[in-house]
Amino acid sequence: MRTEPDRPLTTVDALVQLSFLIQRVLSETGAEHDLSIVQIRLLGVLRDRRPGMLELGSHLGLDKSSMTGLVGRAEKRGLVQRTPSPHDGRAVLVSLTPLGRQLMQRCAAVIGRQITELTEPLTATQRAQLTQLASALVGRPLLDA
């Protein structure tokens, strides 16, 4: 059976294949630290915020029952803690423990190195453009560029 010669990727194909590469980086890093991709994402979201469960679920795209289990398992491992919200007596805020922050920093360093390697074929200008385009697609403002 013959395969087609390499042809230019469509936008959809290029983004899907890029997402596969990123998922592989996250999966391999998670496996090295006994974390699922969702747990890696949880630690990443908590890196610079203390959200409530609803906000956290929104960031991760998970419903309330999935969030309760995810946070509960991370709490049992000593990675996160729940504290009462000072603004709503029914709500709790989720934050990293020192152990969770340390693990998140180790994972972030590995992921950062691997993503940097992934983008090495690009020029500095192309990397800056990629950052701008990706930021526009995810709807987040750029930090200092």
Image: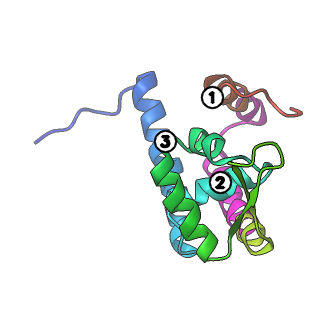
* In-front residue for pair 92/57: 92
Q: Which residues are magenta?
A: 105-129
Residue farthest left in this picture: 1
Residue 120 x, y percent position in the rendering: 67, 47
Is 10 displayed left or right of 125 in the figure? Answer: left
Residue 51 belongs to the span the image colors magenta: no
Residue under the image location 61 percent in, 49 percent down: 118
Q: Earlier in the sequence, mark 3 or mark 1?
A: 3
Quarter of the image where the C terminus is located: top right
Tell me the distance, in whole angstroms, between the alpha carbons under discs 3 and 1.
13 Å
Kindly identify the amino acid type of the residue bearing the numbered disc 3.
Ser
SS at circle 1: helix
Q: Which residue is mark 2?
A: 117
SS at circle 3: helix
Is 121 displayed left or right of 123 in the figure? Answer: left
Crowd around label 2: few <14 · some 14–19 · many ≥20 (10 Å): few
Q: Which residue is mark 3?
A: 19
Kindly identify the amino acid type of the residue bearing the numbered disc 2.
Glu
Tell me the distance, in whole angstroms, between the alpha carbons under discs 1 and 2.
22 Å
Judged by depth in the image, the label closer to the viewer, 3 or 1, is 1
Q: How many marks?
A: 3
Judged by depth in the image, the label closer to the viewer, 2 or 3, is 3
Residue under the image location 50 percent in, 63 percent down: 36
Q: Earlier in the sequence, mark 1 or mark 2?
A: 2
Residue 112 belongs to the span the image colors magenta: yes
Residue 138 numbered mark, or none: 1
Quarter of the image where the N terminus is located: top left
Q: Main secondary structure of the magenta part?
A: helix
